[in-house]
Image: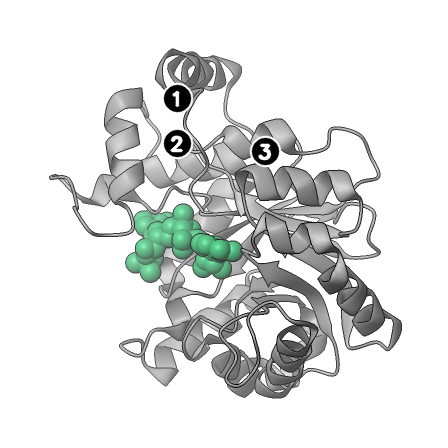
């Protein structure tokens, strides 16, 4: 069975690899493909699915294809801005987001709701943390979370107001690891972009593609995956990184998901491989900010 971990100090348990459901929200992914990946994820033992209000068709597809299996997985979603008629990052936009996610995902409760890249100035006001606490108190959401990176992530963690965080962690993006709590119990931690957007699929620099930044960083890091394939090297680094509870590899392909589950189950990378990644990071990467 796919390993599970306690999700920080929450009462949730999560599989060590989750499904990032950004890709299944794309309109060029068919309903049949979305259903195959979503149901396949649960059949493979994945118990965490991560989505967002801004991921196209993702939330409604989760509702449509997994509505009847809703008690088999932890659902995390994100929102709080871009809501028609409500100012961004107001209590109204957060509450509206939660209601919309409940309806689209056919859920009675959102297990983890993240403020999606909320600016640090807004976090400092504290108003939205109160809104989330009230949503927890009335049972609309289970855990109040913050999704972000760099300084806002550090602020969110230090504030102690969030039961979960979602943040970028991968071989080419290690900055946030510095901020993750090493003590337990602390917030549950979801690693996003865990395989660095798979930049090795591009022979030439993919200018303008979302993998562009990590493609450039991998050139500079000059890592050697040895006998492992790149996806396995990247995912095993993230899944077993200190402070990470689960890594949400994003895919719309069941075959990739199967490989990700198998790779994660092979355990942490050998010490010599980790040392090589660490040396490369300290040589060129230690000043790189996290990708948001
Ligand atoms: N909170 C935020 O602001 C934020 C930002 C970014 C991401 N996220 C979350 O994190 C999840 C993952 O992030 P991400 O999708 O940006 O990055 P990622 O998981 O590092 O990389 C995903 C890319 O890798 C490919 N891929 C997946 N498994 C593969 C495998 N075994 N072999 C080769 N290629 C593989 C996928 O394409 P295929 O579809 O072809 O497999 C996809 O293009 C998202 O789905 C989303 O839930 C959140």
What residue would you read off at disc 2? Answer: 172
Where ligand 1 lies, by quadrant? bottom left
Residue 204 lies left or right of residue 259; in this view the side is: left
Q: Is residue 54 above or below residue 218?
A: below
What residue would you read off at disc 1? Answer: 285
Disc 3 secondary structure class: loop
Q: Are marks 2 and 1 in contact (CB under 8 Å)?
A: yes
Viewer-nearest residue: 234 or 187: 187
- Residue situated furthest right in the rendering: 137
Q: Position of residue 32 (x, y in %)?
A: 37, 82
What residue would you read off at disc 3? Answer: 240
Disc 1 secondary structure class: helix
Q: Position of residue 110 (x, y in %)?
A: 70, 73
Q: Position of residue 231 (x, y in %)?
A: 36, 41
Near mark 2 (Cα within 10 A), the count class, few <14, some 14-19 or many ≥20, is many
Identify the residue shown where x is 37% and y is 55%: 256
- Give residue 131's mark: none
- Depth check, mark 2 against mark 1: the one in front is 1
Identify the residue shown where x is 11% and y is 39%: 204
How is colour applied across the structure in the image?
Answer: one colour
Q: What is the spatial separation of the Cα atoms under label 3 and label 2, in whole angstroms?
A: 15 Å
- Mark 2 Cβ and ligand 1 under 8 Å apart: no
Q: Determine if residue 241 is in view.
A: no
Identify the residue shown where x is 46% and y is 16%: 278
Q: What is the spatial separation of the Cα atoms under label 3 and label 1, in whole angstroms?
A: 20 Å
Near mark 1 (Cα within 10 A), the count class, few <14, some 14-19 or many ≥20, is many
Viewer-nearest residue: 163 or 204: 163
Q: Are marks 3 and 2 in contact (CB under 8 Å)?
A: no
């Amino acid at each position: 069975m796919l390993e599970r971990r306690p999700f920080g100090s929450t009462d949730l348990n999560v599989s060590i690899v989750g499904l990032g459901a950004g890709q299944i929200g794309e309109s060029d992914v068919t309903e049949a493909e979305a259903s195959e990946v979503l149901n396949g994820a649960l059949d493979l033992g994945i118990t965490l699915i991560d989505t967002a209000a801004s991921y196209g068709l993702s939330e409604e597809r989760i509702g449509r294809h997994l509505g009847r299996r809703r008690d088999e997985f932890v659902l995390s979603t994100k929102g709080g801005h871009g809501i028609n008629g409500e100012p961004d990052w107001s209590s109204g936009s957060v509450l509206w987001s939660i209601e919309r996610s409940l309806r689209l995902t056919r859920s009675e409760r959102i297990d983890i709701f993240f403020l999606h890249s909320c600016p640090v100035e807004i976090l400092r006001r504290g108003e939205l943390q109160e809104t989330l606490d009230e949503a927890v108190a009335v049972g609309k959401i289970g855990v109040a979370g913050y999704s972000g990176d760099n300084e806002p992530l550090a602020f969110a963690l230090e504030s102690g107001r969030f039961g979960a965080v979602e943040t970028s962690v991968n071989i080419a993006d290690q900055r946030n690891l510095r901020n993750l709590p090493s003590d337990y119990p602390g917030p549950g931690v979801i690693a996003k972009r865990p395989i660095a957007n798979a930049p090795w699929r591009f022979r030439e620099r993919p200018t303008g593609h979302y993998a562009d930044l990590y493609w450039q960083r991998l050139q500079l890091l000059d890592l050697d995956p040895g006998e492992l394939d790149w996806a396995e090297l990247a995912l095993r680094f993230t899944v077993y990184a200190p402070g990470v509870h689960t890594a949400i590899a994003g895919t719309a392909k069941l075959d990739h998901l199967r490989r990700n589950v198998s790779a994660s189950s092979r355990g942490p990378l050998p010490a010599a491989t980790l040392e090589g990644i660490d040396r490369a990071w300290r040589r060129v990467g230690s000043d790189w900010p996290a990708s948001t």
